[in-house]
Image (spheres, rainbow, N blue to C red):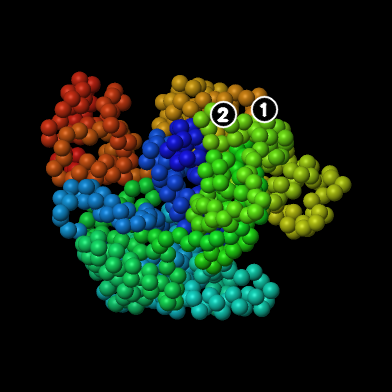
Amino acid sequence: MSLFDFDKDDAKTRYDVLVADIHRHDALYHRHDNPEITDAAYDALRRELNEIEEKYPEFVTENSPSRTVGAPVADGFSKITHARAMLSLGNAFNENDVIDFIDRVKRFLGTHSDNAIDIFAEQKIDGSSCSLRYENGVLISAATRGDGQVGEDITTNIKTIDNIPQKLPAGAPDVVEVRGEVYMPTASFDALNKAQDAKGDKPFANPRNAAAGSLRQLDSSVTASRNLKFFGYALGDMSAPIADTQMGIRERLSAWGFSVPDPIAVTSDVSGLMDYYERIMVARPDLDYDIDGIVYKVNDLALQERLGFVSRAPRWAIAHKFPAEEAITTIREIIIQVGRTGALTPVAELEPITVGGVVVSRATLHNEDEIVRKDIRVGDKVKIKRAGDVIPKITESIEHMDGSVPFIFPDCCPVCDSEAIREEGDVIRRCQGGLICDAQAVERLKYFVSKNAFDIEGMGDKVIKQFWDEGLIKSPADIFTLETRDKTSLTPIRNKEGWGEQSADKLWDAINKKRDVDLHRFIYALGIRQVGQATAKRLASHYISLSNLRTTLDHDALLEIEDIGPAVATDICAFFHEAHNIDVLDALVEQLNIKNFEAVQTQEGVFTGKVVVITGTLTQMTRAEAKAKLEVAGAKVSGSISAKTDYLIAGEKAGSKLKKAEDLNVTVLSEDVFIDKLT
C-alpha cells in the first residue's frame, strides 16, 4: 500500500510522526554530532514528508522541517546571530528532479523553457557548515550553522585550522562573510580512530561526526590536534559585491587563499550536469574527503537575487544526492514498539551488518500491511536500504528460511495487554490503554522533556524510563517536584547506581533552569495530537497567555487561526476539556512560570502584517516572485478578497477581484506603485 492509498487522517498521523522524527534527527546531527541514521535514511524521511506536503499542503506549518534549518545551539558555547540566515538546500535524487529544478527556476523568472540558464556544479562536502566573518580584512568570528539564525561561536577553534586565512588581501570589502565546510581528511580520520582505539575510547562513526565534534571542543588544543580543513564555497553578509557569478565567487575565494574543491562545471545543459555527476561519483572513493552529492546553483548572482528563498532553502540551488546503499542480512526477531499515541510499530531485529561504514542492527517494518505485502518473516534473508523510517527500512524479502511462518500482528498491546484496535481504513493499530499503558505514559514524558519542548539537559530517554520504573515520575509536574521529594527520600538519587552527588546536582540545576518557559514551548510540550511547533506558536500568538487559552478556547474561534483546520481544532478542544489533562495543567502551573507570548520585533514596512492579494498579469516579475517579496516584507499573501484584505496588487487584465476590492474599499496598487513601496 502506498502513502496515497491512505486517507487524509492516516496521512496526517504519519506526517506528525515524520515532523517529530526529523526534528529529533536534526538535533542529533547538528547539535550533538551523533546521528542515529545515515544521510540516505534522513533524506528518505524528508522525501516522504515532501510527498505528503505536496498532496496535503494544508498540513504545512512553520514547524515543518521543510521550513526550518539545523537545530538550536548546544550549551557551553556563546551564540552568534547570523547577519544573513544560513539556510539548507532542497534535494534531488535523479535526473528528473534536476530537470524539474531547472524548470521551476525558469517558470519563476518567467523565462522561456528554451532559454539557457548557466548552472554552476560543485561537490557537496560532507562536513560541518560554518561561517567566517572578516572585518577590515581580519578574521574576527566564526559560527556554526546552528538553527540557521543563531550559531555557536567557534572562533577560537576555527583559528587553529591551517588552511583558513587569518587575513584577507588588500582590496577586500570591509565586511566579508565566507561560508563553507569544515571537514576531516580521510587519512586524519583513520589516524584519529586508531588513537581512540588505543586509548579505549569510542571511535567516531564517520569523518563528518569527527569534524563537527572537533569544532565543538571547549579546549582549542584538541581541535588543533585533529588536522581539520576548510573548503570555502559561498558568501554571507558583504559590505560590497566581489563578483557577478558563482564562478566569480569561487575564483575570488581561491585568490584570497581559500581552498576550493576541484573539479567544478558550468553548463546550461542537463546532460552536462549528469556527466559531471557521474564523473564525480566514480572519483568519490579516491577523494581524501567525504562527499554525499553534487550542488547545482544558478551561476548568475543577479538571477539568484531575483529567485530568492522559499522556506528553508534557496530557489536557485539544489543538492543532487548520491544513491542510498543497500545490503542483505537476516531477521532475528520482530518486536512491537508502542508510541506515545498508542501506535503499534513493528521493528525487525537484524543480524548486524555494516553498510557504507555504518553498522545496522534494526530496521522498521512500518505497519502490519507492509509485513504482509512484502511477506516478511523471522529468519528471512532481507534487503535493507539506508533510507526509510527512524531506522533503515527493509525493501524486500530475498529468501524464506525452512519452517518460517508469516508474522501474526498482535491484537493486544505488548506492554499493558489492552486491546489494540485498527479502525476501518487505518493502517495503524493503536493500544486502547491510554494512561494505564506504561509505554504511552513514558513516551509522553520523553516528549515533554525533548529538544523542542522543555529541553531538559541530562533527562534523556534512559533517565525518564528509570525514574518511571522506580515510581519517581508519573506525570510532567513530578519532574519539577523531584528535587524536593528526593531530599526526604531514604534512597536519594545521588546514592543510586550510575548517579553521584555531582550528577544529581547537575540534574536539579537543569530542571530548575526550565521553570521559566515560553508559552509556545509549553503548549508544544503537552503533546496535543496534531499540534507541532508551528501550531503551538500560532496558539501562543493568538491567545497570548495560558490563562486566556484555557478560559476562552472555542472550536469555531480556533478555525479562524491560520493553518488550524477542523480536525486539529477538535483535538485541541478535546485535550483541554479532558479532566486528567486539566489536573496535569493545574499541577504544572503551580511549578512553572509560563511566560506570555511576545511577538518578535521586526523592522516595520508598508506591507508588514498586511493581507495582500495579487490579481492580473504582472509584467516586471512573475507572481511567484511578487509573492516571495511580499512574504519577505512581512505580508500574508491571500488568494481571495475579503473585508480583511489590506491591499490588492492589480496587474494587467485584472478581473473580478478588482471589482470586489473596489466594492469593499480595499486599497488597490498598480504594479509600479507596488514595486515602489517595496523599495
* Front one among 340 and 674: 340
Q: Is residue 291 above or below residue 43?
A: below
Q: Is residue 151 left or right of residue 412?
A: left
The residue depicted at 40 percent of the width and 55 percent of the height is 88
Foreground: disc 1 or disc 2: 2
Badge 2 density bin: few <14, some 14–19, many ≥20, Cα 10 Å:
few
Report which quarter residue 670 is drawn in. top left
Residue 612, can we see it?
Answer: yes
| Amino acid at dot 1 | His
The numbered mark at residue 630 is none
| Image coords of residue 156 (percent x, y) | 50, 71
Give the Cα distance between marks 1 and 2: 25 Å
Please give the residue where the numbered disc 2 appears in the rendered image. 423
* Side (left or right) of 206 relative to 240: right
Q: Reading the chain from its start, which is encountered first: label 1 or label 2?
A: 2
Q: Is residue 473 left or right of residue 116?
A: right
Q: Nearer the viewer, residue 226 or 209?
A: 209
